[in-house]
Amino acid sequence: MNPTGYAQLDELLARLAGIASLDESALEAEHTAILGRKAGALTEASKQIPTLPPEERRGFGAAVNQVKAAFEQAFTARRAELAEESRRRALAGVDLTMPARHRWIGSAHPVTTVIDEITEIFRGLGFVVAVGPEVETEWYNFHALNFPANHPAMDMHDTLYVDATPVPGDRGGRQLLRTHTSPVQIRELLTHEPPVRAIIPGMSYRNDPFDPSHAPAFHQIEGLAVDEGISFVDLKATLVHFARRFFGETTRTRFRPSYFPFTEPSAEMDVECQLCHGSGCPACKGTGWMEILGCGMVHPAVLANCDVDAERYTGFAFGMGPARITMLRYGVTDIRYMYEGDMRFLGSLR
Amino acid sequence: MNVSRRWLEAFLRRPLDARDVANRLAMLGAPVDAIEPLHADLAAIRVALVEEVRPHPNADRLRVCTVNDGSAERLNVVCGAANVTAGKKYPFAPVGSTVPGRPPKKPALTLDRRKIRGEVSEGMLCSLEELGFEPQDDGIWELETDAAPGTPLLEALPLADDRLVVDVTANRPDLLGHKGIARELAASYGVPFRLPVLPGAVDIDVPPSRRIAESEGAGQSGTVTGGVRVSIEDTEGCARFHAAVIRDVRVAPSPGWLVQRLEAAGVRSINNIVDATNYVMLEFAQPMHAYDMARLHGPAVIARRGRRGEKVVTLDGVERAVTEEMTVIADERGAIGIGGVMGGSGTEVHEGTTDVFLECAWFEPGRIRRTRSALGLSTDASYRFERGVDLWNAAEPFRRCIELVLTLAGGTNVDAPADLWPRVTHPPRIFLRLPRVAQVLGVELPLHTVEKHLVAIGATVVSKPDDGRIAVDVPGWRPDLVAEIDLIEEVARREGYDEFPSDLRRFRTGNVPDAPIVAASERVRDRLIAEGLLEAMTLPMVPVSGEGIRLLNPVSEEHGMLRHRLLPGLVRQVELNWSRRVRDVRLFEIGAVFAPGSAGELPQETPRIAAVVSGSRAPEHWTGAAPDFDQWDLKAIFESAVEVAAPGGTIEPDGEGWVVRGPDGRAIGSAGSLAADAPPWAGTVFGFELELHAGPRPPVRFVPRPPTPSSERDVTLLVPDGIAAGALAQVLSGGGVTVLESVRIVNAYRGDRVPDGTRSVTFRLTFRAADRTLEAAEIDSAEAHLLLLLERETGVRRREQ
């Protein structure tokens, strides 16, 4: 037996309870005093082990280890406690309502976003994206599209003419800024055999003064599908599908007769007013509907102008103004915001 | 087209709800832009009987009336009108009501009980003007009504109406008259429609018109009616001319019903003769004209081409020069009106007119359009003629006009009216194939349905051959129906577009890929958004300056030219942001620029990308402000854009900025600082512009990245001026050391601690071998090799510490 050794251990154990109340420096001093590798009390105690008779070594060794474990646990616990306290103290000094550190974030123009969404929906319906020139000849912009010469239908297309020599030939005429993206229909039909299925975003131009609802240059998206067996039902189905995907699956639509020289039958598609959902409000002039796009079956004369057999092939076409749709979607009140580049505007409609 | 609800009700013989009418018209292709209630503000006004009129004790020009307003009490009303008479009925505005007046000349007035020169007045007896109508005299409005005192004025008289502003498409001239609108509605409601009865119409016997065909060989047509020689010399511009003379008319104000109808249609009443012609125009969409016969020289009325140097003073008092391209109406002395556009003031019907000459003609639409456009004079008449009036049924409106004149102004029609129609034609006959209907509409409609719809628009289905075709004679008022497809549209329209199914069917996809520029634009857009820039759009029309493509008829000088660069537009947007005290601007744009083509060719359109940055490099933060954008930020964005927009392009220094060259050596873009109209607090503007290459995306291959650790060595070189750091980096990269993974420049210094004319540049060399960890000795020898190479090729050596 080694009563001295055990007595020492008992003395040390008496200090165990005190650890829970030590501050950081006292704790480390106590740690050194008890567990220090060179002169710690328990280190000293374990040094006695080899000097004990063999039959006592095991018992005493176990006792030392037990005490050591208890102390280590106590020190670890107290250290964690102190660390937590100090973290809390540190945090108490930080005002977490202070602003974060941001980076600049870019964004597409809201009209681009709308164009992309529209384009994606039609890509899903087998349409490809086509483009064409913005300066056109009278033939492509008007004649090929069955505009009667010198007719009031031209009044809707107040045209900007370019100061350049007229283009000679059957498909020429005066040079102008295209008043719609429809001449790209002609270019597509002239260069591709049906089936043609194209969605055509691009700039269009009218001699309109810049005011809250008009811009002399504006975006348009045109669609064209020509193949055997395409009918008015396909036109309606395609555009209803589009409206539901774009405005929401429950969106109601209606088709009204209209007039465009290059389509017949011609129609306008309305969707339920996005503000009042049909009950009538100032934005929809109480009708519950908003005019979204013009459409129709491609006029046989247009197909003939593109050397497409109008008896064999039929097709539909449609056009809409993504800037107008953008304005409806976000409630933008003046189209000029779209073209002035105000950072605050562009950054707010991501 | 302003349409009166009441007028339509007179056609359909039934009450109509304006909103329902608007909805039906919209679904028939004539949307209603607005419904304007007329005179709804007179709801409080009542019919009152003046029972007694006494002089006002304190004022000579005022009277005191005892008024029966239908209630048990009698009211005391002071009245200043000279025409107030006991036993007559007048509109009465009770205390508390408001009369609209005609602001600003006659403001609205709310009545209260007050004393006028000591006499209590409990309301007001009203004049036309006080109630919002066109004034006719100074007095109060004497009502001709059987309605009992106390009856609301709007119930006693047909005043309340709704004006429907109908948006009529350019192909539907028939909808520019109430009859055409009524025809559509009648079919929609499934009821008949008839011309309204003219109030006060007496049994009038007008002999049928005498049809005058082409005079032999002359290419002209002429006759005499009522003593006036009438002829068409310009049969191309004027295909048909109805003429009549009515003698001994009494020109006077029109009756209330007529004034109301014209007003509802937005037309001001002039006198009974002019109003009769306008009424018929608004009913039939057939413009008419009345001349004062006493002022016709000859008397003759000739439809002929204008003559060089000829002038007419039109009804608006403007002297207008006519040309040989125009059709004029002339008498023996010269032109007296511009056919189909506007009459002349010299032959205008006026108060003293006793004999009138009535014209109902058909003018060629293209001629009218060119004429009114040349004169800058669009009228109700020209608007209808250029869209096409009914050539074949003109007798009906003409007869209506004669009856109306005789009803309103008395007089006698002394001679059979003349109908000059040199070359009689018929509306087209169109063949319609039922299978074609199904092919276009996607639904097989039975023959009887198709027939029903065509009959509803006034067409005659004349035969039913067994070959699946039907022959359709279209009505004269539908000049838009010329081909089979036009009839198919009518069938669909009358069937109702909403009746057609809308289920997606099988389709074949397009057989060409997307235009390459589309994907290229998307790639570069995504890249610049990732760089933190916002996409902007500028108008492609820019202020006129220097060479470029000009517009012949620009919206304004500010938009007089097509842009040949994108950057100026973006710089203007930077300046706009500055003007709004927005300092941090980062914008880019993708769009076409224009360069003149060869003569007779379209311009060259090149897609481009441009960007501008100015102001702080990062959003402000309280821990410390970020520095402003500088040229190195620009270079980074530029390189980033070139990588996607112009793959294979090489960037070179150029002046104070950079230029990028395509694989063929052509400069395709540049970057640098930009001049701008900057406030003192603004940052420098940096920007670039670059052609957008529309080719396919260069292939990207996977490269394995070795898991072995790398070692870095920093080498600081003393670089004499004139030697580019980029060139040194190239020598190092190309030095044949396979384990050299990368060369980066991490520091540069110019100052006291290096000799004049030199700078020190620190290159960080990263070494790595894919198959092993490199030993220090191997790296040492590689480094030594590179330094030796550098000295041999460029003379540049390590900076001595």
Image (cartoon, helix red, strand yellow):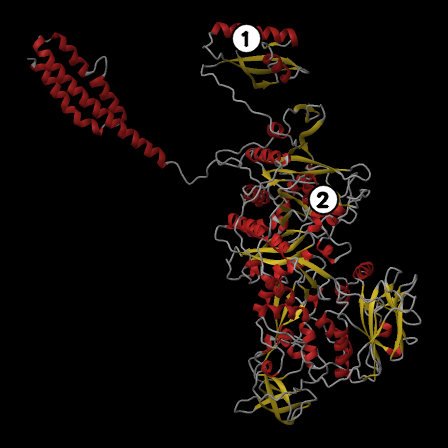
The kind of residue on which mark 2 rests is Asp
The circle on residue A307 is 2
Looking at the image, residue B230 sits to the left or right of residue A211; the answer is: right
Which residue lies at the image location 55% right of the left edge and 42% below the top edge? A120
Which residue lies at the image location 16% right of the left edge and 13% below the top edge? A46
The reply to whether callout 1 and callout 2 are in contact (CB within 8 Å) is no
Question: Could one spot residue B458 in this view of the protein?
Answer: yes
Give the crowd class for mark 2: few <14, some 14-19, many >=20 residues within 10 Å: few
Looking at the image, residue B702 sits to the left or right of residue B226; the answer is: left
Q: Where is residue B504 in the image (x, y as percent from the top left)?
A: 53, 48
Looking at the image, residue A108 sits to the left or right of residue B478; the answer is: left
Q: Which chain carries label 2?
A: A
Give the crowd class for mark 1: few <14, some 14-19, many >=20 residues within 10 Å: many
Say if B123 sits above or below B778 in the image.
below
> CA–CA distance between discs 1 and 2?
71 Å
Q: Where is residue B544 in the image (x, y as percent from the top left)?
A: 77, 43
Q: Do labels 1 and 2 share a chain?
A: no
The circle on residue B158 is none
The kind of residue on which mark 1 rests is Glu
Would you name the residue on which mark 1 appears? B783
Q: Is mark 1 on a helix, strand or loop?
A: helix
Q: Quadrant of residue B135?
A: bottom right
Residue nearer the viewer, B452 or B201: B452
Question: Could one spot residue B119 in this view of the protein?
Answer: no
Q: Quadrant of the N terminus of chain B?
A: bottom right
Say if B420 sits above or below A108 in the image.
below
Q: In which quarter of the image is residue B410?
A: bottom right
Which label sits in the foreground, 1 or 2?
A: 2
Q: Quadrant of the C terminus of chain B?
A: top right
Q: Where is residue B82 in the image (x, y as percent from the top left)?
A: 70, 89
